[in-house]
Image (tube, rainbow, N blue to C red):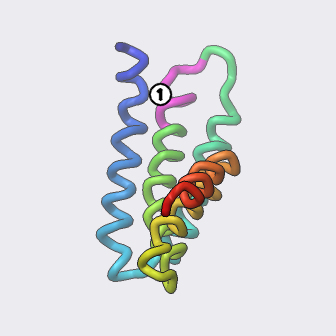
Amino acid sequence: MPTGLTFLPQTLTIVVGAQISSRLMPRIGARPFLVGGPLLISLGLLWMAQVAVGPAIWSSVLLPGALVTLGAGLAFPAITVAATAGVARSESGLAGGAAIALAAGPSGLLVPGRTRRAAP
């Protein structure tokens, strides 16, 4: 239970980031989130790389982890919007899923491709 509570801020920040991105994107476009999200992820990962033995969990895990997940929450809706722009409606799910899989890691690409082949 304490471990789950320790990572609760990360869960909340990805939700907050996705809400902010989804609500502001119609007004300002996807580009600021496509740049700002990965920038926050990079800063959070750089912060995590500075972890030394014995630091407090807030400064070594929670805050940088929250920064990473905030960036992901800001970026993933924008990635989906950018990937599905100009794609036929019948293919938009595949395009959005493939884009997120490519952004999140190469192994995730296998799932949308396999689902696509299995669909009639």
Residue 112's x, y, as percent? 56, 55
In-front residue for pair 67/99: 99
Residue reaching furthest bottom? 86
Q: Main secondary structure of the magenta part?
A: helix
- Give residue 17's quadrant in the image: bottom left
Query: Can residue 74 be seen by looking at this rendering?
Result: yes
Q: Secondary structure at mark 1?
A: helix
Residue 46's x, y, as percent? 67, 44
Left or right? Give the position of 42 relative to 5: right
Number of residues whose C-alpha sits closer than 10 Å to that of mark 1, classed few (under 14), some (14–19) or many (20 or more): few
- Give residue 35's quadrant in the image: bottom right
Identify residue for label 1.
58
53 relative to 91, above or below? above
Left or right? Give the position of 29 relative to 79: left
Magenta includes 11?
Answer: no
**Residue at figure coordinates x 58%, y 49% from the top left:** 111
104 relative to 55, above or below? below
**Residue at figure coordinates x 36%, y 31% from the top left:** 8
Instruction: Check the picture and name the quadrant holding the N terminus.
Output: top left
**Residue at figure coordinates x 63%, y 40% from the top left:** 47
48 relative to 70, above or below? above
Span shown in magenta? 55-63
Residue 66's x, y, as percent? 46, 41
Q: Amino acid at mark 1?
A: Trp
